[in-house]
Image (cartoon, rainbow, N blue to C red):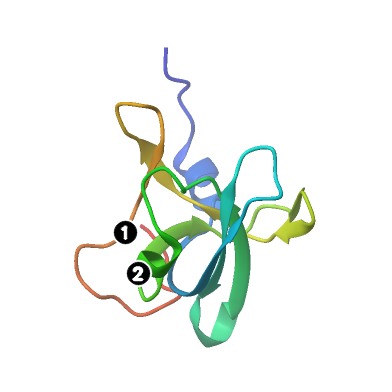
Amino acid sequence: MTKIISYNDFEKVDIRVGTVISAKENLKLKNPSIVLEIDFGKKIGIKKSSAQLTKNYLSNDLINKQVAAVVNFEPKQIGNLISEVLVLGFPDDLNEPILVEPNKLVPNGVKLF
């Protein structure tokens, strides 16, 4: 059963859009990932994220893609990297992430509402 939360709880999660400016595979981890540098605009800046995307994405294909991410979680140590934001996705048939992205270009840093 889905837990019901208030709208105020939803507003605490800061989900923003940003453009991937760098993407590099990190094969040193137990679960290979892609390290993303994402530009969230002037107010938030460039943030790093480590995401297990290697089953559905090539690093080069992620460059210039706009993605949604939670920008107000505490940074998390993932292997040798501090992941500053959590990119969002939905599972495919094999439970591998498919990134959430706008279907039209929007300004970097705008908040989901």
For label 2, the SS is loop
Question: Does residue 66 show up?
Answer: no
Q: Is residue 6 above or below residue 110?
A: above
Q: Residue at x 42, y 19 (%)?
A: 2
- Image location of residue 72, percent across then percent down: 63, 58
- Between 7 and 77, the one lying in front of the other is 77
The residue wearing badge 1 is 101
**Tag 2: amino acid:** Lys
- Image location of residue 111, percent across then percent down: 42, 66
| In the image: residue 48, left or right of residue 28 | left
Q: Residue at x 53, y 45 (%)?
A: 52
Q: Residues within 10 Å of mark 1 (few under 14, many from 20)?
A: some
Q: Quadrant of residue 1?
A: top left
Q: Residue at x 79, y 56 (%)?
A: 80
**Tag 1: amino acid:** Glu
- Image location of residue 17, percent across then percent down: 41, 67
In the picture, the disc for residue 65 is 2
Q: Residues within 10 Å of mark 2 (few under 14, many from 20)?
A: some
Q: Is residue 111 above or below residue 6?
A: below
Q: Which one is closest to the eye, mark 1 or mark 2?
A: 2
Q: Are marks 1 and 2 in contact (CB under 8 Å)?
A: yes
Q: Residue furthest left?
A: 104
Q: Residue furthest front?
A: 27
